[in-house]
Image (cartoon, grey):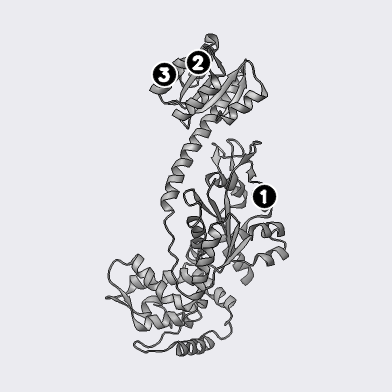
Amino acid sequence: MNSHQSILILDDEEDLRSILAQRLGRRGYEISEAGTAQEGMALLQENIFEAVLLDIRLPDGDGLQLLQEMKKRQPDLQVIMLTGHGTLESAIEAMKAGAYDYLTKPCNLSELEITLQKALEQRKLMLENTGLRQVVHRQNAEPLIVGDSEIMQSLKEMTRKIAQTDTPVLIQGESGTGKELFARALHVWGPRRAQAYIPLNAGAVHETLMESELFGHEKGAFTGANAVKLGLVEMADQGTLFLDEIGEMPLNLQVKLLRFMETGEFRRVGDNRLRRVNVRIVTATNRNLLEEVEAGRFRKDLYYRLSGMVLHIPPLRERKGDILQLAEHFLRVRLKGQLHLALGTQEALLAYDFPGNVRELAHLIERGMILAEGDVIHPGDLWPDHGEGGGSVQAAIPVPDEGTVMDEKDLKTRNEENQSESLEGYATLAEIEKNYILATLKKVDGNKVRAARLLSISVRNLYRKLEEYS
């Protein structure tokens, strides 16, 4: 049943109106009828309609002009034009004026019903998209990128410049460096900020669903497609689409993404209609895409299309001057009481290499806030299993004695000494990452989904890492 869906039939042929009213009434639609433009506009002023079946020639008016007046009064109204004098020119004019479709009389009633159903589904999608945009707009607050180091100041200045263009941007950096924060900055600092910002993690969607997620699908396009689905490219129209972990995208979909970027055109799954949107594409990866290209896992032409501009986000170990500023920021954002970092905690943070980057620092501060007794966070609050982890990565953290004051040179020296002692046999960054992943898996009793969530990587990426570790 199509309860509460009101349809206006506006046609001067009474017999046709009666046939349509009976047919659609049996389908559960609420039907109103009018034979003149004046009667139709009077009904439109007093009622809300989902759709109108509109004759192009009326005794007291032109249906095309009436179409424009109706769309002004109810912008989401779906209008299907009917005429016994169909021409290509009038069809084009009707579509330009905002008609959903154009049918020639005598109408095939089954075809009309299908067209009407699709029009109503399109209206529903438009309303849902409007609600989504309103939510997204509220999320488009000014992004706060913490860090006053020279490298970060330079990066923020470059980001502001690139934001003013529509050039595709590839953001590169290790996991946890803040790539998504810079992607949102590119949107909010640019001319598209009033439009939608739509993020998608390409590693979090199964490859069989990726095309539908990006481009949408029609009802019945595949098993389980029980309704029309709006794709993310349509949701992001006039705005920004951020594709995180772009290196995870399947090769067959890379071809379609490349074509979309070059033309702005796409088709929903199960639909032959070509659609066009205007979207800025921003992507991010923690992989070396050129190496992926050489290995045959990523298309070279797509790589060069994505990398119109490239932003390299430095790891936290390369901007240690920002560590304490970031720590204080996380304390302010998440703080419920008054807490501060002990001097020994500050020194331990400065001496640590942060393989998990800013994300790891945020988790450490949150852990310290939970475990701290009193108003001071001590090193043991950040690393409660320090010294007990055996081969765990925490055992490599150089925690100075409380109250010891060291300058930057001393901190570096102690860090190097402790790492050479604690990381003997696996001192490379890759080996530290391996140990960190395996230690996380151990903590969650081998639950790969929980481990991936804690590590902030996709399950597929975790499996790939485990395969590398045999």
- The amino acid at mark 2 is Ala
Percent position (x, y) of residue 54?
Answer: 53, 20
Up the image or down, 186 lies above or below 99; here it is below
Percent position (x, y) of residue 236?
Answer: 53, 47
Disc number lying in front (2 or 3): 3
In this view of the protein, can residue 470 be seen by the observer? no
**Dot label at residue 42:** 3
Cα distance in 3D space between marks 1 and 3 = 47 Å
Cα distance in 3D space between marks 2 and 1 = 46 Å
Q: Which residue is label 1 attached to?
A: 262
The quarter holding residue 270 reads: top right
Q: Nearer the viewer, residue 8 or 450?
A: 8
Pointer 2 local density, CA inside 10 Å: few below 14, some 14–19, many at least 20: many
Q: Nearer the viewer, residue 278 or 440?
A: 278
Label 1 SS: helix
Question: Given contact means CB atoms under 8 Å apart, are the residues at marks 2 and 1 in contact?
Answer: no
Up the image or down, 417 lies above or below 110; here it is below
- The amino acid at mark 1 is Glu
Q: Earlier in the sequence, mark 2 or mark 3?
A: 2
In this view of the protein, can residue 415 be seen by the observer? yes
Label 2 SS: helix
The quarter holding residue 347 reads: bottom left
Q: Which residue is label 2 attached to?
A: 21
